[in-house]
Amino acid sequence: MAEKRNIFLVGPMGAGKSTIGKYLAQQLHMEFYDSDQEIERRTGADISWVFDVEGEEGFRLREEKVINELSELQGIVLATGGGSIKSRESRNRLSARGIVVYLETTVEKQLARVQKDKRRPLLQTKEEPRDVLERLAEERNELYREVADYVVRTDEQSAKLVANQIVELI
Ligand code: S3P
């Protein structure tokens, strides 16, 4: 890699974006950011609070703004929220401002990962988590592919190895 271009990780919740992103940033001596964490930092509240008070629409506006601003930085690794690619504006910005890597996984793996973390508001419904994740995958997987420069599977090897694979690819 000639210069430090931004690396943007996209993919569904439970794909390992934050864990892999941190390894990647460490290896490449880049700054790591996470759009959810940035929203939490700016609002001083957690994501579920934002969903409760402002609805998904309010959350998406904040997410779009954070992605717009962070993607203008230089030499960062950014883990984006799983739904951020629903915004055409965010997709365009990510493509224009860095290398986009889609972390692809299976619903099985997602379930194993997200069940350890109960904070995801889209899973706090009566609908079974598996059904939610399958529905979201149907709605979004094409969008992840469309925006991605590279697609890397995360269900077959450890986060560290996936990070190594990305370093080799880019
Ligand atoms: C969401 C994914 C979450 C978070 C919010 C909505 C989504 O981020 O942004 O709960 O729409 O898929 P992660 O992908 O980091 O879990």
Image: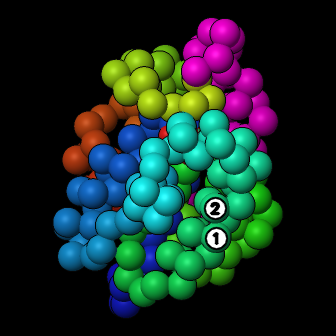
Q: Main secondary structure of the magenta part?
A: helix
In percent of width and height, residue 6 lies at 45, 77
Q: 163 left or right of 82?
A: left
SS class, disc 1? helix
Q: Residues within 10 Å of mark 1 (few under 14, many from 20)?
A: some
Front-most of residues 77 and 59: 59
Front-most of residues 83 and 120: 120
What residue would you read off at disc 1? 65
Question: Disc 2 versus disc 1: distance between alpha carbons?
Answer: 5 Å
Marks 2,1: beta carbons within 8 A: yes
- The tally of labels here is 2
Residue located at (38% from left, 27% from top): 117
What residue would you read off at disc 2? 62
Residue located at (62% from left, 60% from top): 63
Which range is magenta? 124-150
Q: Within the displayed image, which quadrant is ligand 1 positioned in?
A: top right
In percent of width and height, residue 122 lies at 62, 29
Q: 13 left or right of 164?
A: right
Q: Is residue 88 magenta?
A: no
Residue 73 seen in this snapshot: yes
Quarter the C terminus occupies? bottom left
Q: Is residue 37 above or below residue 135?
A: below
